[in-house]
Amino acid sequence: MLWLQADERLEKKEKLELKKSELAIERERIKALFTIISDLRHIQLSKMYFKTDAAFKDFLTTLPSYSGDAKKDKQERRWKVTKRKPGEIPAWKKKRLAEQASESLQ
């Protein structure tokens, strides 16, 4: 008699575990659908023209589904202003001159 009861309880437990996993999958699907719908709503509310790629990337960080540090990412994308000494050649110009020199050697 004990064996039958134990077997029935194990069977119920297995059914509960299966149901639990199915519900977890369903919850993930609903979460994904919610983020997609919230993104679409956000895009619809702010129909705008982006003049630069940076402005577009800034907009993407405002989407509800964005899962990063928007403020930090925005600062990394901005131009960095560095003060040069008089007569110092900027890094971008040095790079371009080096490329031109390597091209002329070939």
Image (tube, rainbow, N blue to C red):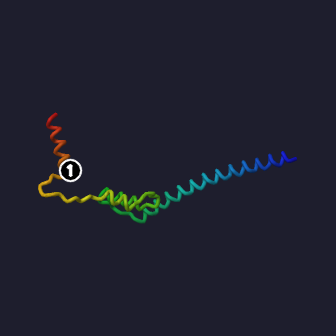
- Judged left or right of residue 59, residue 101 is left
Left or right of 72? Residue 21 is: right
Relative to 8, 28 lies left or right: left
Q: Quadrant of residue 31?
A: bottom right
Q: Residue furthest front?
A: 85
Which residue is disc 1 drawn over? 92
Q: Is residue 5 above or below residue 38?
A: above
Quarter of the C terminus within the rendering: top left
* Amino acid marked by disc 1: Trp
Between 59 and 98, the one nearer to me in the picture:
98
Classify mark 1: helix, strand or loop: helix
For image coordinates 43% across by 57% down, the residue present is: 68
For image coordinates 72% across by 48% down, the residue present is: 14
> Could you say which quadrant of the image residue 71 lies in?
bottom left
- Crowd around label 1: few <14 · some 14–19 · many ≥20 (10 Å): few
- In the drawing, does residue 3 fall left or right of residue 51? right
Kindly give the residue lying farthest to the top in the view shown: 106
Q: In x, y percent, where is residue 94?
A: 18, 47
Residue situated in front as seen by the camera: 38 or 81 = 81
Q: Position of residue 32 (x, y in %)?
A: 53, 55
| Residue ranking furthest to the bottom | 45
Return the x and y of residue 29 as percentages of the image width and height. Answer: 56, 54
At 18% from the left and 52% from the top, the residue drawn is 90
- Work out whether 101 lies above or below 58: above
- Residue 76, horizontal then vertical, whole percent: 33, 57
Residues 19 and 5: in front is 5
Q: How many marks?
A: 1
Q: Residue furthest left?
A: 87
